[in-house]
Amino acid sequence: MLHCLIVKKINISFGLKAVPGEPVKKDENSRRGNWGNQIEFVLTSVGYAVGLGNVWRFPYLCYRNGGGAFMFPYFIMLVFCGIPLFFLELSFGQFTSLGCLGVWKVSPMFKGVGYGMMVVSTYIGIYYNVVICIAFYYFFMSMTNLLPWTYCNNPWNTPDCTGVMGTPRTNATFANVSAVVSGLTEIVNRTKRTSPSEEYWRNYVLNVSDGIGNFGEVRLPILGCLAVSWVVVFLCLIRGVKSSGKVVYFTATFPYVVLTILFIRGITLEGAISGIKYYLTPQWEKILDAKVWGDAASQIFYSLGCAWGGLITMASYNKFHNNCFRDSIIISVTNCGTSVYAGFVIFSILGFMANHLGVDVSEVADHGPGLAFVAYPEALTLLPISPLWSLLFFFMLILLGLGTQFCLLETLVTAVVDEIGTDWIIKNKTYVTLGVAIVGFLLGVPLTTQAGIYWLLLMDNYAASFSLVVISCIMCICIMYVYGHKNYFKDVEMMLGFPPPLFFRICWRYVSPFIITFILIFTVIQYKPITYNDYVYPRWSLVIGFAMALSSVICIPIYALFKIAVSEGSTFLERLKNSVKPDPDWGPALQEHRKGRYATAGPESVEVCPLKEELKDEGKEKLKEKETEQKDEMGLTITGSNGSTLNPTPSA
């Protein structure tokens, strides 16, 4: 009994599964499962938030928007929008122990927001794994003595190709790079230069067609790597959070080891300092540019993964009393710190590359896949033992991508399992995971064709941008103004033991919605049609892009109208009021946590060990009862004249 008391006390106080030496570990939520410990949750969330965008998107935005001056609006947006939204989603999912669909019992009419999150996660999961599979391909192709994109003497190269390594020479060594670069003057004087890494990327790896409508053939090597990528993701999620929680010990931490190795190597290269100076030098005249603030807000918003449904899903496997406030700060700061750190790594290498090319850093850096698969691979060819550095770099990209992909897939699986909710589907969650992985692989096949890069960029720019802002804004409105900010603050206090800090309450109600609205308006005003290098997307493809963006947003009004129509009530207003009322099952998942206004609702309780304090109080009450009984007996005792005692009995 004493052991049971200690275990229960530690579970509630610290969120741990058992005391040291405990032979059997049981989940708090035995039916649904929990994280093995909070380290697994933090690492998984870090892996989810820290992704490929931290490596190629943040450095590009930083030097394009004033270098060090961009840091100021970036951290302002982190404090007033990023961390509050992160905490909101973590607390939302942890309170109910449900995924992105189940949590909308808070106001059933808004369940369309959850479906919108599922649609967004589906789009991102499809094309994100294609990017990972390309990183797998480059990783495999780096297992050679000479990187295939080093020289211009390959069948896929064009006359415009000019490599910084000149031509292959038998007496040349990689240690003496400056001696190998013989045609530098010709490179600088050319009006058009195509690097061997760019031609390898476009003409060999992708074999890009002439337009988005010309699919051409499936690139079999990319298709094979896509299959490998999905198999890896499935195997890591085969037991849900129980298996992914163990994998993240490696996938979430090893990228930092690689980044550190590349950073140490990068800052020792010639010209690295110029790249870092370009990265950090403030251009204060741009601080008043609205576009700089818009880019800072959007980068914080998208890099943290808000409104994807993943944060809600990951937090739903936490123990009820876990301190998600602490976790949200740790994860958010780690994510943004990683972006800044990756900027040092990237620009030290790009500064070295610019030094050898004799051009400015801005001319060798690129945005998106161009930075990861064109500029950086070319820089790797300049390093001694370049295949080793290439292996490390692309292995880092794979791990960064997998960390995000794990959560995207788990979001979809958890939503399906929670929505069906039967014992069979919970016990056979592996089959749901396998089904989602197979469907994701099949939907990703078109992206491995010769037109795949066009569709990938279209999905990235439309399906996962505008809709995220709308979903996040509506989520804030629902929780703060429909369900009620006072109710939600009490829920958080019941869960954490303390109310949300005043700063977060103000941000949730006013500041964050204002920033989100600003991003939305700015996105619409500053809209420019997507392009890929010199290729201009046709109008019909842009229509498809807008359709993908609206496909997630349209779920919200459609489901709202459906819920109003099926709700009880004789008039529209009555049905509207009933549709926004919290579901009777809304609240903590376990009966032991349903207190206050949740005390009479919810599922049947599970038998738990009583707390030590409860037993003490119960013992004191029993002792008082015994003392009272003894006093009553003494008061009723009659002493006889001969010293004997008589206990009178009550009359019938």
Image (cartoon, grey):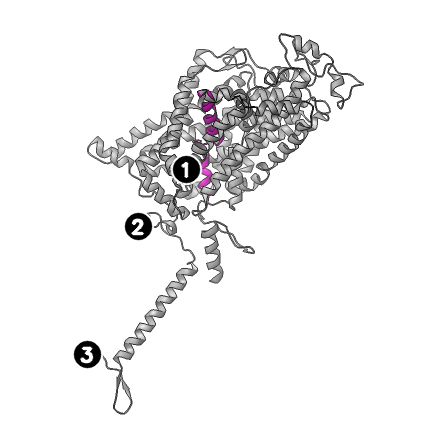
Q: Which residues are magenta?
A: 290-319
Crowdedness of circle 1 by 10 Å Cα count: few (<14), some, many (20+)? many
Q: Is residue 523 left or right of residue 644?
A: right
Q: Amino acid at mark 2?
A: Thr
Q: CA distance from mark 1 to mark 3?
A: 67 Å
Q: CA distance from mark 2 to mark 1?
A: 26 Å
Instruction: Return the residue at label 3.
Output: 651
Which residue is drawn at the image coordinates 27% and 31% (left, top)?
A: 564
Q: CA distance from mark 2 to mark 3?
A: 43 Å
Is 103 situated above or below 10? above
Q: Is residue 241 left or right of residue 513?
A: right
Which residue is drawn at the image coordinates 39% and 23% (left, top)?
A: 520
Q: Please say whether residue 315 is one of the residues in the magenta stretch.
A: yes
Crowdedness of circle 3 by 10 Å Cα count: few (<14), some, many (20+)? few
In primary-sequence order, the first of circles 1 and 3 is 1
- Assign a secondary structure to mark 2: loop
Instruction: Return the residue at label 2.
Output: 600
Instruction: Return the residue at label 1.
Output: 88
